[in-house]
Amino acid sequence: MKTKNNKADAILWKDLKKGDVLALGKIYDTYIDDLFEFGMHYSQDKSYVMDCVHDLFLDLYKYRAKLIDTDNIKNYLFKSLKRKINRKYHSKTVNIPNAAVLNNRNSIPSIEENLILQEHNTEKIQKLKKALVLLTRRQKEGISLRFNENKPYEEIAETLNVSIQTSRTIIYRGIKILRQHLATISLFTGTLFFF
């Protein structure tokens, strides 16, 4: 027998499949904290888990027409996140200095390897700065509070003088803009290094 929550989930899911952005936002607001906590059981890398969670929501909207029906959104999201974390974990590429360390634990990365890594990071920083220009002041502030200062949404809402739901939406939209821009310039290869 379906409970009231199952029916509500089924309706919300159908709205998402039809392209309703508000439905996606409601799912995000409802489950973001639970998903993050769940993901941390599979990886202790906080930024990696957040990256996987946000990838999951982007994929939900991008592939909404192909989603199977569900009346238990939480269960669906947890299973999808677990697969995403495991898949991305196994496919992560290793940087040159890390490869050198793996091959010989006593070896130290060469000057050339360090320079290549430094150039790569400098290039990423420059491109990220260009992408940040696309964000509103509130989006920049919200993202900084959430990921650089580890503030909970309640504190972010208070700082920005908005509701908790609005603070989540501000951050979600800012991340979406960054991901779209960084993917467009072929920079995004896994995680945004400052999250």
Image: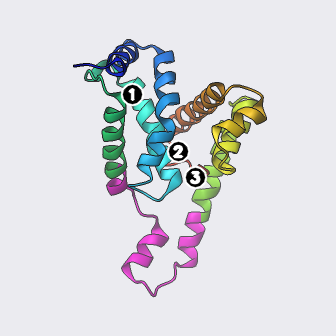
The Cα–Cα distance between marks 1 and 2, rounded to whole angstroms, is 22 Å
User: What's the residue at 57%, 31% (across, down)?
Assistant: 172
Mark 3 burial class by Cα count in 10 Å: few <14, some 14-19, many 20+: few
The reply to whether residue 189 is in sight is no
- Sequence-wise, which precedes: disc 3 or disc 1? 1
Start and end of the magenta stretch?
88-117
Tell me the kind of residue under disc 1: Leu
Q: Nearer the viewer, mark 1 or mark 2?
A: 1
| Quarter of the figure that contains the N terminus | top left
Left or right: residue 117 compared with residue 9: right
Tell me the element at label 2: loop
Query: How far from the left and from the top, in percent, is residue 124?
Result: 60, 50
Query: How far from the left and from the top, in percent, is residue 153?
Result: 64, 37
Tell me the kind of residue under disc 2: Leu
Q: Give the camera-side residue of 99 and 78.
A: 78
Left or right: residue 42 compared with residue 128: left
Residue picked out by circle 1: 60
Residue picked out by circle 3: 193
Q: Are marks 2 and 3 in contact (CB under 8 Å)?
A: no
113 part of magenta stretch? yes
Query: How far from the left and from the top, in percent, is residue 39?
Result: 42, 48
User: What's the residue at 46%, 22% (across, down)?
Assistant: 24
Query: How far from the left and from the top, in percent, is residue 174?
Result: 62, 32
User: What's the residue at 58%, 77% (across, down)?
Assistant: 111
Q: Vertical placement of 85 versus 79: above or below?
A: below
Q: Vertical placement of 156 versus 48: above or below?
A: above
Residue picked out by circle 2: 187
Tell me the element at label 3: loop
Q: Which mark is residue 114?
A: none
